[in-house]
Amino acid sequence: MVSIIKDPGLKDKGEAMVSWAAEHMPALKEIVKSYKDNKPLENVKVGACLHITKETGAFMLALMELGASVALCASNPLTTQDEVAAYLSDNGVDVFGWRGENEIDYMAMIHKVIDSNPNIVIDDGGDLHSTIHKERLEALPYIWGGTEETTTGVVRLRVMEKEGKLKYPVIAVNDTPTKRIFDNKYGTGQSTVDGILRATSLLISGKTVVVCGYGYVGRGVASRFRGMGANVIVTEVDPIKALEAHMDGYRVMSLYEATKYGDIFITCTGMKDVIREEHLRQMKNHVILANAGHFNVEINIGALEKMAKEKKRIKPYVDQYILEDGRKIYLLAEGRLVNLVAAEGHPPEVMMNSFSNQLLSVIYIYENRDKLEPKVYDVPVEIDRSVAMYTLKGWNITIDELTEEQKKYWETW
Ligand code: ADE
């Protein structure tokens, strides 16, 4: 198929970006090295819907080195690195995506990936899986299974499974410890700071940052902002997570109450309408709103638009809304993932774990394609452990082993 990308001329820049990422993802290299000789993915067609970043580039090349052919589209209209798209396209990947797609093109590119008749589908957010299930049932006979990269996508898939609508097995890569602990926490934590800094270039120290949601993502975001000298307030709907945030030393209160204090609000929940009109009405002048969740639904942008008498883009990724009462509210990255839109997403060291899980899960689906049922599966524990081992090895970190005596000691209990 012919790629649809912004500019093939960007390929050299893309090569430098992907090489930089790959150099910092040694576990991915180790996995390729150990599987390469028998090309386990020969004749396997992979269809992927991922943020088209330099880290994704390294992952796509790893799949191809193991024999797969790959078609790739974007999992968000605003996050594609066009240089990477150009480089991958020049290196045999069918790429369908560019930065700044409208909603219609975004969906059309997902259909292009489905047109490639993939055997294994990799998704980030669930749009590819849901389009196949709702609109492209004719693709199902080719599909052995799929994987899902993110919390939002896994939530959607579990609902489909519960309703008996899931038509192929999916491995919930998001939920496995070597993904979730590192990617959701350290990855989103650092890259959200990065996105907000690149967009605003303001001082964090001394500001009051309100983190909505204290799951893995919220924990990471709260801890990185605290590390930069912010006063962090956490808001939650779950009493246990609220207690955890309290004992981690954050101020915890309702979002309505937090509007009195907050300078920067960051949504990290996966839920819609977290920041609503009633909150916007109470916020201070000059507050900044950003979202770190998968979809642009966490901040009610419709309410903000309705309340504003004027809207102006004052710099890339910063929209100023002037409200009837004269207050100014700034929305970053149009309410989309601020870490991927205004910055470059998670660092390669973090994506290494996530994509190593993906790579080994794809091989697992291929090898077990006749046994798996249309269910949501956890990543097998052996894969999770081996990802950790590959990463430790890549970083020259040694660990201890139980002695035979110690193993017996466990067993006698
Ligand atoms: N999700 C978050 N950060 C990412 C990155 N750098 N590449 C691909 N997907 C991501």
Image (spheres, rainbow, N blue to C red):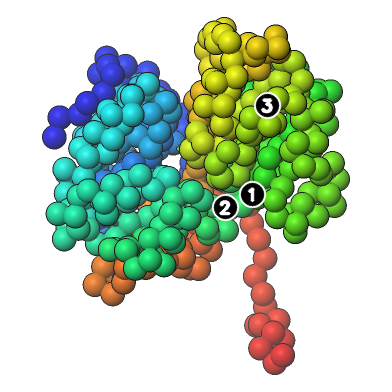
Between the C-alphas of marks 3 and 1, the distance is 26 Å
* Residue type marked 1: Tyr
Q: Which mark is residue 22?
A: none
Q: Position of residue 79 (x, y in %)?
A: 43, 28
Asked whether disc 3 touches disc 1, contact meaning CB atoms under 8 Å apart, the reply is no
Q: Position of residue 69 (x, y in %)?
A: 21, 45
**Tag 3, which secondary structure?**
helix
First in sequence, mark 3 or 1: give its number. 1
Name the side, left or right, on which 296 lies relative to 269: left
Q: Give the quarter of the figure containing the N terminus.
A: top left
What residue is shown with label 3? 280
Nearest to the observer: residue 243 or residue 172: 243
* Residue type marked 2: Arg
Question: What is the quadrant of residue 285 in the picture?
Answer: top right
Q: Residue at x 64, y 57 (%)?
A: 398
Q: Is residue 310 above or below residue 32?
A: above
Q: Residue at x 57, y 52 (%)?
A: 180
Asked if one can make out residue 155 in the rendered structure from this viewpoint, the answer is yes
Of marks 2 and 1, the one in the foreground: 1
First in sequence, mark 2 or 3: give its number. 2
Nearest to the observer: residue 398 or residue 78: 78
Q: Which mark is residue 180?
A: 2
**Tag 2, which secondary structure?**
helix
* Residue type marked 3: Leu
Asked whether disc 2 touches disc 1, contact meaning CB atoms under 8 Å apart, the reply is yes
Q: Is residue 99 above or below residue 116?
A: above
What residue is shown with label 1? 216
Q: Residue at x 31, y 72 (%)?
A: 373
